[in-house]
Amino acid sequence: MEQIIIPPESIVMISTANLEAMPRRVQLKSICKAISVLDAILCQEWADRYYSYNSKWAPDEEFCGMRNGQGDELLILFQAEGCIINGMVHEYYPKDKTRLTMGLPKIYDEFIFGEPVISIGTTFCLWSSSDKKWEIVDISDFNDGSEEMLAIFDGNPLSYINWAKDYYEENFIVNDETERIVTSIYEGQPLTKEMVHLLANNLEDWDQLLNDLEEINYPFQFT
């Protein structure tokens, strides 16, 4: 399986201009965990990963982060009854953060106006209370880089496969088993050593992977 292409009719363009396509908070959390597990398998060096997840960020808070090493970052905070996403795409910075956060519930102030968000910057911000629809300030300027940043959250395992085979290159095994294994992880099925071997070339540090899975709070059966 040299190349996997998502059929055009299945592509969902998520952006701040199309929040209807954005998954609800609970599904988003599952996707964040899945892609972070996959990154932990394919790249054992945390600093070189694209996606990461910390289920122990703070009491009653979990965190997912994305960084591409070129100044673009996505920071997602999950709370018991809500979620907020801060996006930073350096090509579109700076933006009027006061306007981007108009109407933002006070429970997110510490996150959006504190560290590390304040140092990273903000080009778009969206939030969801409970498991309701996503909210964003009604502005006419949606030129904020959100389409590229949010595309991975379409819930399609092929989206991750297409991205990872380019990003991780020879470290990512792409064959007839790949879609089945990645789909299983998207579905939250326990990770096994067999699944790991079918995805990654030469995983060296199993203890590191165990620590990553525990931090993500993802089930595994390494027996």
Image: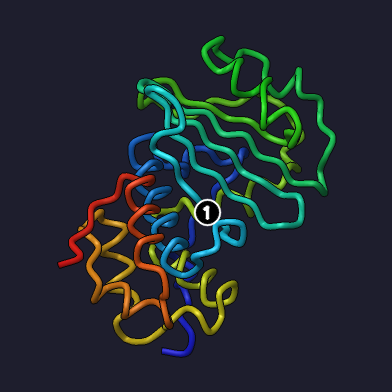
Q: Which residue corresponds to the image point at 38% horizontal and 45% vertical from the top-left?
A: 215
Quarter of the view holding residue 99: top right
- The answer to whether residue 123 is above or below residue 138 is below
Answer with left or right where residue 215 lies relative to residue 106. Answer: left
Outermost residue, left side: 223
Q: Position of residue 211 (x, y in %)?
A: 37, 53
- The answer to whether residue 191 is above or below residue 126 is below
Outermost residue, bottom side: 2
- Quadrant containing the N terminus is bottom left
Q: Which residue corresponds to the image point at 48% horizontal and 36% vertical from the top-left?
A: 63
Asked whether 197 or 157 is in front, the reply is: 197
Quarter of the view holding residue 117: top right
Answer with left or right where residue 39 lies relative to residue 69. Answer: left
Asked whether 149 or 54 is in front, the reply is: 54
Q: Position of residue 86 (x, y in %)?
A: 62, 34
Q: How is the image coloured?
A: rainbow
Q: Which residue corresponds to the image point at 76% horizontal and 18% vertical from the top-left?
A: 98
Asked whether 54 or 151 is in front, the reply is: 54
Q: Residues within 10 Å of mark 1 (few under 14, many from 20)?
A: many
Q: Which residue corresponds to the image point at 37% horizontal and 46% vertical from the top-left?
A: 216
- Quadrant containing the C terminus is bottom left
Q: Which residue is mark 1?
A: 51
- The answer to whether residue 154 is above or below residue 144 is below
Answer with left or right where residue 189 lies relative to residue 6. Answer: left
Give the amino acid type for the residue marked by disc 1 in the picture.
Tyr
Asked whether 48 or 204 is in front, the reply is: 204
Q: Position of residue 164 (x, y in %)?
A: 52, 70
Q: Secondary structure at mark 1?
A: strand
Q: Position of residue 8 (x, y in %)?
A: 49, 69
